[in-house]
Image (cartoon, rainbow, N blue to C red):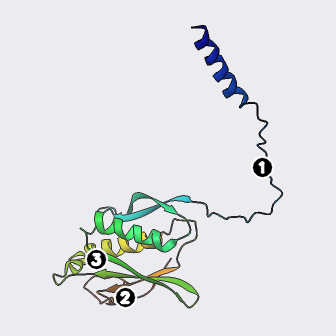
Amino acid sequence: MYIKQLLTMLIVGIILTGCGNDVKTEVDTSENLPLIQVEPVIKDTLYAYTIDYDKMLNIPIEIEVEHTGDIMSSIEKLAKVLSDKIFNGLEILIVQKEDINGKEIVTINLQDSDKGEWYNYFQGSTGGMVTTKTLEETFLQRDYTGEWIDGIQFQYNGEPMPEFDHTIGLDTIIYR
């Protein structure tokens, strides 16, 4: 029993003292190491919008978007939210961002099947206005104070936006 206690004390002593070796733990910081720059992740809150039919006011659907400066990625996330939550899964494709007369304009394609489902969202003056405002306000993010695009333009099945009965202004560039 005395030997077990002695061995235990010896092992604890070795662990605590590091076996008696004088190990240096200094790090040489005099070298010129390359700096690695990491973009900070900024979480911004962006909104998808729908419209209150009675009061004709924007109603935000809050979504949190991690925004690291990649505006197109954020716009694609907004398109997915609109598609899933407002337009029953209809495709909203982000085609491109281009410079038009010194302004950053994003082209958005409303992809439709042969059934004309997007057309149904533009039926009637109220339906057309609600759909137009939902798309416009969501993609332009007029209340967002960070860096954003200057405008949007729409396509329908990859072609310039046709004039449906109530597509109010979707056939031109809409500016922020």
Q: Quadrant of residue 109?
A: bottom left
Question: What's the CA distance linking mark 3 and mark 1?
Answer: 67 Å
Residue 171 bears which disc, if any? 2
Of the residues tagged 2 and 3, which is closer to the observer?
2
Task: Tell me where residue 68 appears, x and y as whole percent.
Answer: 55, 65
- For marks 1 and 2 on the same chain, the one whose residue lies earlier in the sequence: 1
Q: Quadrant of residue 94?
A: bottom left
What amino acid type should be assigned to the residue bearing mark 2? Answer: Asp
Which class describes the residues within 10 Å of circle 3: few (<14), some (14-19), or many (20+)? Answer: many
- Tag 1 secondary structure: loop
- For marks 3 and 1 on the same chain, the one whose residue lies earlier in the sequence: 1
* Residue 44 left/right relative to 94: right
Is residue 97 something one can see in this rendering? yes
- Please tell me which residue is depicted at 41% across the width and 71% down the height of the picture: 76
- For marks 2 and 3 on the same chain, the one whose residue lies earlier in the sequence: 3
Residue lying furthest left in this view? 115
Which class describes the residues within 10 Å of circle 2: few (<14), some (14-19), or many (20+)? Answer: some
Of the residues tagged 1 and 2, which is closer to the observer?
1
Task: Tell me where residue 105 appears, x and y as whole percent.
Answer: 49, 83
Task: Tell me where residue 168 appears, x and y as whole percent.
Answer: 34, 82
What amino acid type should be assigned to the residue bearing mark 1? Answer: Val
Foreground pick, 23 / 4: 4
Note whether 9 is above or below 148 in the view shown: above
- Please tell me which residue is depicted at 24% across the width and 81% down the height of the picture: 112
- Tag 3 secondary structure: helix
Q: Which residue is mark 1?
A: 27
Is residue 53 something one can see in this rendering? no
Q: Which residue is mark 3?
A: 128
